[in-house]
Amino acid sequence: MTREATELLEKALRLPPKARAALIASLIESLDGTSDDGAEVAWQEEIDRRARDLDQDIVGLVPWAEARRQILDG
């Protein structure tokens, strides 16, 4: 992450929860391009599969702090 992005993140994390949620939604929306119906169906199937795996204890959850550490450590 660049220094500028790190500074923005630090500022964003100081926002109240509702403001952070609105910021997240805006950022995600800015990344969305034109919708591909096939992709939407595939994502819904993937979400359903993952939810099923969680419900059936096939997979477990990882706390965000651990997941973030793994992502940043590569």
Image: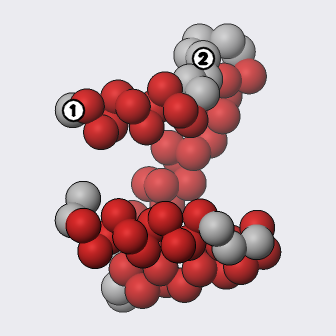
Residue positioned 74% across, 22% down in the render: 55
| Residue bearing the label numbered 2 | 60
Residue 38 appears in view? no
The reply to whether the C-beta atoms of the residues labelled 2 and 1 are less than 8 Å apart is no
Q: Work out whether mark 2 precedes mark 1 in sequence or the reverse, and give the earlier one.
A: 2
Residue positioned 38% across, 70% down in the render: 7
Residue positioned 71% across, 79% down in the render: 19
The location of residue 2, given as percent across then percent down, is 21, 65
> Which element type, helix, strand or loop, lies under badge 1?
loop
Three-letter amino acid code at the position of disc 1: Gly
Tell me if residue 21 comes above or below residue 46 in the rendering: below
Mark 1: few, some, or many residues within 10 Å (few <14, many ≥20)? few
Q: Which mark is residue 74?
A: 1
Query: Which quadrant of the figure has residue 54?
Result: top right
Determine whether, in the image, residue 23 is placed left or right of residue 3: right
- In front here: 58 or 19? 19
